[in-house]
Amino acid sequence: MKIGITCYPSVGGSGVIATELGLQMARRGHEVHFISSSVPFRLEHNYDNIYTHRTEVNDYSVFKYPPYDITLSSKISEVIDRYDLDVIHMHYAIPHAVCGILARQMSRKKDVGIVTTLHGTDITVLGHDMSLVSAIKFGIDNSDITTSVSNSLTEETYQLINPESDIQTVYNFVDETRFNTDNRMEIKNELKEKLNIPDSAKVLMHTSNFRKIKNVDDIVRTFHETSKEIECHLVLVGDGPDMYSIRQLVQELGIEDRVHFSGQQSDVSSYYKLSDAFLLLSAKESFGLAMLEAMYCGAVPIGSTAGGISEVIRHNETGYVVGVGDYKKAAGHLIRLFEDDALYEEMQKNMLEDVKKRFDMDSIVTEYENLYTKLLAGE
Ligand code: GMT
């Protein structure tokens, strides 16, 4: 098959899934075309059957806003025609699904299939903006197939957008060759030494784009409560708009000596392997891909009840889920877990078995491949 993929190429779960899916499709022998504003950040290798097409958005002085959506649609239609694409897979309802639909109308190939995947913010945040609801609905209803990354997001889309067409949940996945427990102890020890974390200390971790909805302040407070009973350190990986206020909170709580701001990291898997627990206490979260990556690397998760997090964590079996804002309960779970080595080991074992069963990359890539095949067969 010849598959076009459009995503936001910057750091972020939707870009990661789009890129990994493209890589896996290419490994299966399909021809893959990434059409986006820059080369997706996890696309590190060169493959003969992967092509990248960059859209240049010109900032003409006659326009108040650069015409990203139109430029992208035009580029997608050009690639559909030049390479005779069978399917285009658009990540995000707006603008990308709408761009895909426009591109199909612009192109000569009116039967190119359109698959759209909803990732979260396009629904849970933008879906509340009445000025965008019609565009999101248009994007979903005019795609041939729409998928969403969790049942919670599927439900929320039906409630907020009320589309006519079906939405199918296809869970996110993790590439186990990249995220695994290989050399976990060695890597943990090396990083502990580098960050000056004592051998005996437990490590809590979080990584994100530090947006308000990630509630990183609750993570810092969870750590603060936990550290009253357990010797531990907190490692924060990534950067974003809330970083300044988080640094301030850390200072106010007087815990600067045990909180490590590691910034953006290209090799985030080593940080997952350093960690005993991963925290994701967001107010909104369709899935929590970084948390799943951390679980694959052996870190036990504490998540909030937001969105699809509780579809990834089986509460009390593979980690813990607490109400949004309940950092005291999160700390209580961590304290009990760290005080009981047997409980920790049992939970870690259950977690590794469970994620490998339910989020296995090959099975999920096959689900997408079957959707493409179905479209090609005109079903
Ligand atoms: O979490 C973010 O802010 C990034 C965002 C994105 O668009 O990349 O992530 C969304 O998509 C990921 C992949 O499907 C999900 O794992 C994240 O949970 C989801 N983020 C939100 O719903 C806030």
Image (tube, grey):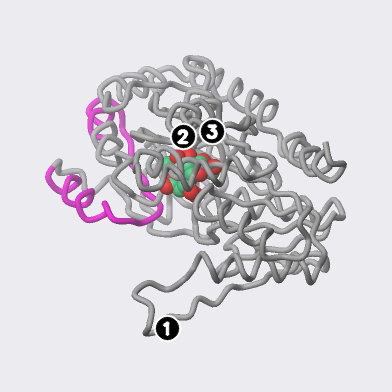
Quarter of the picture holding the N terminus = bottom right
- Label 3 vs label 2: CA separation? 6 Å
Callout 3–callout 2 Cβ contact below 8 Å = yes
Residue at position x 51%, y 35% in the image: 287
Question: Can you tell me whether the CB of the residue at mark 3 lies under 8 Å from the nearest atom of ligand 1?
Answer: no
197 to 309, vertically: above or below: below
Which residue lies under the disc numbered 1? 60
Question: Which quadrant, please, contains the C terminus?
Answer: top right
Whether residue 199 can be seen here: yes
- Mark 2 belongs to which amino acid? Ile
Whether residue 119 sits left or right of residue 213 in the image: it is right
Residue wearing tag 3: 163
Judge left or right: residue 168 versus residue 207. Answer: right
Residue type at tag 1:
Tyr
Where residue 36 appears, as percent x and y from the top left, is 59, 65
Query: Range of the magenta residues?
Result: 224-252
Q: What secondary structure is marked by label 2?
A: helix
Mark nearer the N terminus (1 vs 3): 1
Which amino acid type is marked by label 3? Answer: Pro
308 to 122, vertically: above or below: above
Residue 115 at x, y percent in the picture: 68, 46
Q: Position of residue 278 (x, y in %)?
A: 44, 36
Residue at x-position 63% and y-position 28%:
355
